[in-house]
Each structure stands twice: as C-alpha cells, then as structure tokens.
Image (spheres, grey):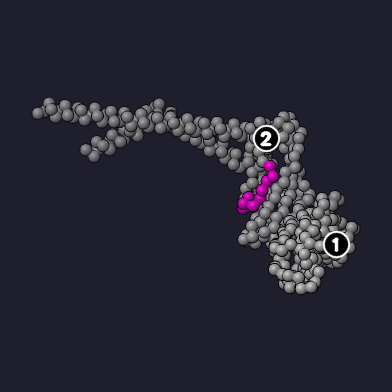
Amino acid sequence: MKNKRNLKNKNLKTKKSEMKKLKTEKLNLTLIFLLIFFVILFLFLFISNLLILDKKQIFTNVIVSNYSGFDLNSTALKFGFVERGQGAQRSVIIKNDFNERAKIIIKIKGNISDFLIVSENNFFLEENQSKEIDFSILLPENLILGEYNGVISILLKKF
Amino acid sequence: MDIKSFNSKEKLINFNSKEKLIIFLSFLIIILSLFNFNLKSTGHSINISDSAVINITIQQRVNINFTLDRINFGRGSIDAGKQNATIDTLGNVTNGNWSQITSGFRIENLGNTNITLYLKSNKNAFEFLGGTNPDYEYLITDEESGSCVPININLSQWYDVNTTGDGTEICNVFSFLEDSDTVNIDLKLIIPSDAGDGSHSDIFTATGIVIDS
C-alpha cells in the first residue's frame, strides 16, 4: 500500500516536472520569437531612417470663410480664405540636389489632410532634376467655418 | 497543496541565466526600436550628409476656383416674345423671371505683398449658355477704394470672359493695404430664347501672383 502511494507520488512529481519543462520551453520560444520580431523591427526602422537623405517640412493652412482671399506667403503653403464648396491650388518646386537618383515621398498631417490633395507622390528625381508639384484643396459644402492647418513633409530617400 | 503550487509557480518565474539573457536582449531591442521609431516620427532623421539635398521652392501664386453654383440664379424663363433675357449679380433681371441676385464674388488680398490678379472662366458664352448671340461677362469694382489698379481693363465696365491661359489680368496691382485690399467680381448673362434648357454651370478661376519687388 505504501509502495503504491510512493509510486503514485513519484509519477505525479514526474508529470509536474514534465509540465514545468514544457512551460519553460514555451516561454523560451515566445521570448525568442519576440526577440526576432523586435530585431527585425529595429533593423527595418533603422535602415528606413538611414535611407532618408533629407526632410523638409512646410506649414499649410486654409481658412474656410464666406468669401475668398489670397494669402501668398513664401515660407508656408497658405491657401488663404476659401468658400465652402470651392477649391484652391498652390504649387511647390522640389529639386533633388543629391548626387544620385532619389525618391520623393510626400506626407500630409493635420486636419487639412482630409481635403488637401497632392498631384504626384512617391516619384523619382534624377540628380539635379526638379519637378513642380500641385497641392489642391476642395472644400466640402458642409465644412464648418474656421481654420484648418497641417504640415507637409517632403522626404528625399535613397533608391 | 496550495503552498506547493505557489512554490512551483515561483520556480517558473525564477529564470535560468539563458532565459535572463533572452529577456534582457528582448527589452533592449524593444527600447532601441521605440527610440528608433521616435526618431522617425519626430522628424529628426539621420542624414548621410550635413548639407541639404532637397530644395523646396514655394511658388508665389495661388489659384482660387469659384463654381457658378455659388451664385445661384435659380430657375427662370425668358418672357414670351423676347429674343433674350439679361440677368446679373447687381440685381438686374430683364425680360425674364429669374430671382434677383445682388452679390457676385468678393476677393481680398490677405497677405503682406501686392499681387497681380487674373481671372479666367472655363467656358465661353456659347459653351456656357448656347443659343444665338449669348453673352457672358464680368465686371470688376473696388469694394475698398484703391484696391485694384488695372492696366488691361477699366473698373466698372463689363467684359467678355476669357478662357485662355490664366485669363485676363484684371488688376495689375492688387493692393494688400488694410483699407484697400478687396475687389468685387460681378457677372452678367444674356440668355437667348433658343439657349438649351436645363442647368448650366461653370468655374471661374482667380489667380494671384506676387509682384517681384
């Protein structure tokens, strides 16, 4: 009877030990997976950053009003006063001064981004090549009167 | 039993040196990744060279579009026996039953430089109205005295719309000064009796270009 109980206890201990081992292995696997994932993420972001040769940011805004107005500014892309349901266009010239072919990526952030459209994006420029890019806004009829702002980021990337 | 199970859990948390290394590396990589992401999102990119390689020039011009839907003459018809009807944004309606419209477009120079102002339409009178001898004209006036200095046109005089290029230079100098920086654009339509039925619309484009000082 005692032997039987001892055997049962031994079996239970072995089972517990196996379960513990299994759990440890699972944990190890998860940690290794996480490690690989973050190594890849780190490398991706690091290389991605390294490929950015230059970045320029332009402030942009439009004032939704009941009449129209020009606001020509050389440091910001201001559309002035524009009426609801109407549109406006401005343009910028982008020049690649890098000594080889590069990719231009344009990103728009802010509450103006819902109705600001760029004529071309993700395009290549040869060395010393420049291109005029149009930025257009078309205001919806139901837009609330007021000021809408944003930042246009122009990135020059290798490749 | 409870104590034993607690002890077994405790043992699980006690990692061996290999596991500790993996955890340490994972956290290190996570921190580096987040730091790297932050670098990217805040715009402090790592440049290969110190000198700027991208050159941005903001063009000193802006186009503002006005759809004629904004000036809604509404429904109307030409009086019986008349060859045409005339409607404008000064409140005149002749030989027709359109509703009176008393305001056209208003443009202000909000900036701090004088600009040259051009006006063009997408359609000419025939394209816009159709029929025999239609007319489609604009009139420029100062809302604030001294706002517009024209060369090619006279203020307060009707002119046919222009569909070519940037259109007609309506103000050689459109002033930015606080009390003289607003102009009005009014429109006149002569609608022939044989003009097509239905809704007609067009887009006006006002272009402002900074005057080089």
Numbered label attached to residue B25:
none
Read off the residue under disc 1.
Answer: B159
Task: Kindly identify the residue that appears in the image at 43 percent across and 29 percent down.
Answer: A32
Q: Position of residue B140 (x, y in %)?
A: 83, 63
Q: Is residue B118 left or right of residue B22?
A: right
In the rendered image, residue A14 lying in the magenta stretch gets the answer: no
Q: Is residue A70 visible?
A: no
The outermost residue toward the left is A1
Residue A112 pos. (x, y %): 64, 52
Residue under pointer 2: A103
Magenta stretch encompasses residue A114: yes
Residue A77 percent across, percent down from the top left: 72, 50
Residue appearing at x 64%, y 43% in the figure:
A107
Above or below residue B153? Residue B99 is below
Front in this rendered view, residue B187 or B170:
B187
Q: Say which residue appears at 24% left-offset and 39% top-offset.
A: B2
Please state the chain letter of the residue tagged with numbered disc 2 in the rendered image.
A
Q: Which residues are magenta?
A: A111-120
Q: In the rendered structure, which amino acid carries the disc numbered 2? A: Lys
Q: Secondary structure at mark 1?
A: strand
- Camera-nearest label, 2 or 1: 1
- Proximity of marks 2 and 1: CB atoms separated by less than 8 Å: no
Quadrant of res B24: top left
**Amino acid under disc 1:** Tyr
Number of numbered discs: 2
Q: Secondary structure at mark 2?
A: strand
